[in-house]
Amino acid sequence: MTQEKPAGARLLELVAVMSRLRRECPWDAKQTHGTLAPHLLEESYEALEALESGDSDALREELGDVLLQVMFHAEVASERTDGTGYTIDDVAEGIAAKLVRRHPHVFGDVTVSGADEVKQNWDAIKAAEREAKNGAPGSVLDGVPFGQPALSLAAQLQRRAERAGVPSELADLDGAAGLGAELFALVARARAAGLDPELELRAAARAYRDQVQAWEQARRP
């Protein structure tokens, strides 16, 4: 009887494949964190598109491409000899430790009433980590990546602020005029309705694409 491999065994095979590609493939060998950066973003967007399409096979494939980017960056980092290097094991160890630390209701003796309290504890633990790292209390907005698309950036800023108890009226930007302020307020309205503004706009974009393509099809002889 053939014994099934434990979960995660194939990840070791991927590590070996990535290591060999880095040594023997001219293209893979010359890549850097910088040259790989666009692929990390592109593959993430492709995974999101597959998720939205409802195609489970496509999503599985795209998640593999995202995983490849993680493996690739870790392999590049492992080659550094200046003391800043790390391996895929270091990456996995770090995120595993973070998950254990921020889930004391699972790995410790903390009791929670539900998902909302889990979020509250997560934020409190994260804030304590920031203070321990910086030697002083930080902002709840620390770590929000401003390089992301503006719509998702506005939503993330508002989510973080809301969980910290920031008054919702601050989203009005003190009555600031301009289209940007109006869009920011619209994001707040969407969130108040329980909607993700980024996903809502993406859905509208897909609907518009379908209508344009139908219009084009109708005009063809």
Image: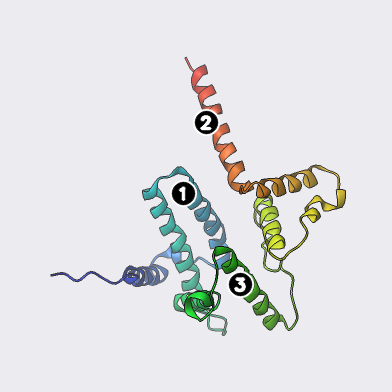
- The residue indicated by pointer 3 is 121
Tag 3: amino acid = Asn
Residue 95 position (above or below residue 152)? below
Q: Camera-side residue: 152 or 215? A: 152
**Can residue 149 be seen here?**
yes
- Which residue is painted at 70% across and 59% down in the image? 157
**Can residue 87 be seen here?**
no
Q: Quadrant of residue 67 in the image?
A: bottom left
In percent of width and height, residue 94 lies at: 51, 77
- Which mark is first along the chain, 3 or 1? 1
Tag 1: amino acid = Leu
Q: Camera-side residue: 175 or 135? A: 175
Tag 2: amino acid = Asp
- Which mark is first along the chain, 2 or 1? 1
- Which residue is painted at 74% across and 70% down in the image? 139
Residue 167 position (above or below residue 128)? above
- Mark 2 packing: few (<14 Cα in 10 Å), some, or many (20+)? few
In percent of width and height, residue 21 lies at: 39, 67
Q: Looking at the rendering, in which quadrant would you find the N terminus?
A: bottom left
- The residue indicated by pointer 1 is 51
Tell me, for residue 210, which label it has, or none. 2
- Element type at marker 3? helix
In percent of width and height, residue 129 lies at: 64, 79
